[in-house]
Image: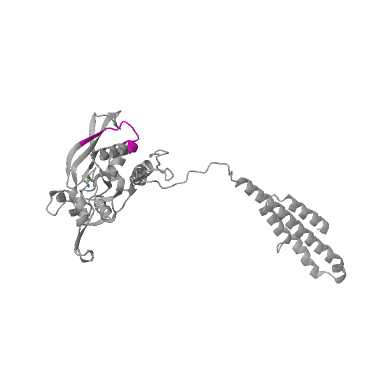
Amino acid sequence: MEISQLETETLTAIAAAGSLETLDSVRVAALGKQGSVSLLLKTMGQMSPEERQIQGPLLNGLRESVTAALAARKAVLEAAALDQRLASERLDMSLPAPHAPTGSIHPVSQVMDELAEIFADMGFAVAQGPEIEDDWRNFTALNIPETHPARAMHDTFYFGLNDAAGGKRMLLRTHTSPVQIRTMTSQRPPIRIIAPGRVYRSDSDATHTPMFHQVEGLVIDKGIHLGHLKWTLETFLKAFFERDDVTLRLRPSYFPFTEPSVEVDVGYAWINGKRVMGGSENWMELLGSGMVHPKVLTHCGIDPMVYSGFAFGVGVDRLAMLKYGMDDLRAFFDGDARWLAHYGFDALDVPTLSGGVSP
Ligand code: DAH
C-alpha cells in the first residue's frame, strides 16, 4: 500500500475514534507489533541502501504523524470524558443538607436540664454527691437510725464491710437526700441547692426500676417556713408543666428527716384519654417534702435555734413520664434506639426559661 494512502486511512480512523477504547484499537492496528505501520517499518531491513535513503524518511514521517495524531486525539477524548464526569458528578451546593443521623437527649437528661434551669432562676445551685454512699449520710444523719423501720422500706443494696472505708458500711444511695447532709456539712447557710442524680433500690416492675432518678431540693436560712416551701414548689411545678393552672394539694405525711412533713399531690383531668394537669378532679402523689428536722440540722452542725429550712424529693423519671406521656418506666433504660428516637430531644434544644423549658 502506498505510504500516503496508509497515512490518510490511519489519520481518518484516528479522527473518527469516538472513545478512548476505539482510539486504542486504532493505535494497535497501526503501531502494534502486527500493526500496518510497524510492518511497513520492518520492510526497511530488506531494502537496498539507496531505496532506504528515500523510503526511510517517508516511513519515519508516517510513524511520527500517526503517533502525533494519536496523542492529540487522546487528549481531546480525555478532556471530553473529564467534562462529562464533572457534569454528571456535579454537586448543587444550594440544596438543603440531608438529614444526618444524630443521637438525641434522653428524656431524663432533658428533664434534669429543665429542672436546673427552673431552679437556677430561683437562685438554686446544683449540688452533687456520690452514688456509693455511706450508711451514716444515707440514713443515720437523716434521722433514720439503725432500728428505724424506714430502713427496711428502702430495699437497700449494701456492699460488704469495707476496711478502706474505715470499716464503714457502704451502700448504693437509696435517695438523693444524703446530698443534703453533704451540703450542710460542707457549707454554711444560706443554702439553696437542688441535687439531681441516680438512686438505687432493689425493686422492679412497670413503675419501679432498680436504678431511677431523683432530684432533691434544700433551702436553709434564717426564718424559712412552710410558706416558702409551698411557694417554691408551686412556682417550680407551674414552670415545669408550663401551665398557670397547676393545682397543688399538701397533705400531712411522715418522713424521718422532716418535721412537719408534707406530701404534695397535683390535680389533673382526663381529656380525650389524655392526662392533663390542672383542676381538682383527680389527684396524684408527686413528691415528698417538709421542714428539715432539727435533729438533721444538729447532725450537720447547724443550730436549729438560729436556722430553719425545707427540703423536698421528687422522682425525675416520674416527672418525665407525666410531662412527655410515657407509661412504662422500664423502657427508659432499655437503650432501644427506636424509643430514644421517638422520645429523645434534639441536642440543640437546650431548655431555657426565655425560650421555653421544653422544646
Ligand atoms: N428521700 C425521700 C424518698 O426517697 C423523698 C423525700 C421526702 C425527700 C421528703 C425529701 C423530703 O427531701 O423532705 O422517698
Is residue 83 in view?
yes
Asked if residue 249 is among those painted magenta in the image, a careful observer would answer yes
Q: Position of residue 198 (x, y in %)?
A: 28, 50
Tell me if residue 43 comes above or below residue 232 in the rendering.
Answer: below
Q: Where is residue 158 in the image (x, y as percent from the top left)?
A: 19, 57
**Would you say 14 lies left or right of 333 here?**
right
Q: Which of 238 and 296 is in front in this view?
A: 296
**Would you say 55 lies left or right of 302 here?**
right
Q: How many marks?
A: 0
Q: Which residue is drawn at 34% across and 37% down?
A: 239
Tell me if residue 36 comes above or below residue 236 in the rendering.
Answer: below
Q: Looking at this rendering, what residue extends furthest in the bottom direction?
A: 49
In which quadrant of the rendered image does the C terminus lie? Answer: top left
Q: Where is residue 192 in the image (x, y as percent from the top left)?
A: 30, 47
**Would you say 80 lies left or right of 245 here?**
right
Q: Position of residue 10 (x, y in %)?
A: 76, 55
**Would you say 187 lies left or right of 102 here?**
left
What is the image's colouring? one colour
Tell me if residue 297 comes above or below residue 229 in the rendering.
Answer: below
Q: Nearer the viewer, residue 250 or 108?
A: 250
Asked if residue 89 is among those painted magenta in the image, a careful observer would answer no
In which quadrant of the rendered image does the N terminus lie? Answer: bottom right
Q: Quadrant of residue 357?
A: top left
Q: Looking at this rendering, what residue extends furthest in the left direction?
A: 147
Q: Nearer the viewer, residue 296 or 344?
A: 296
Is residue 154 in view?
no
Region in magenta? 238-250
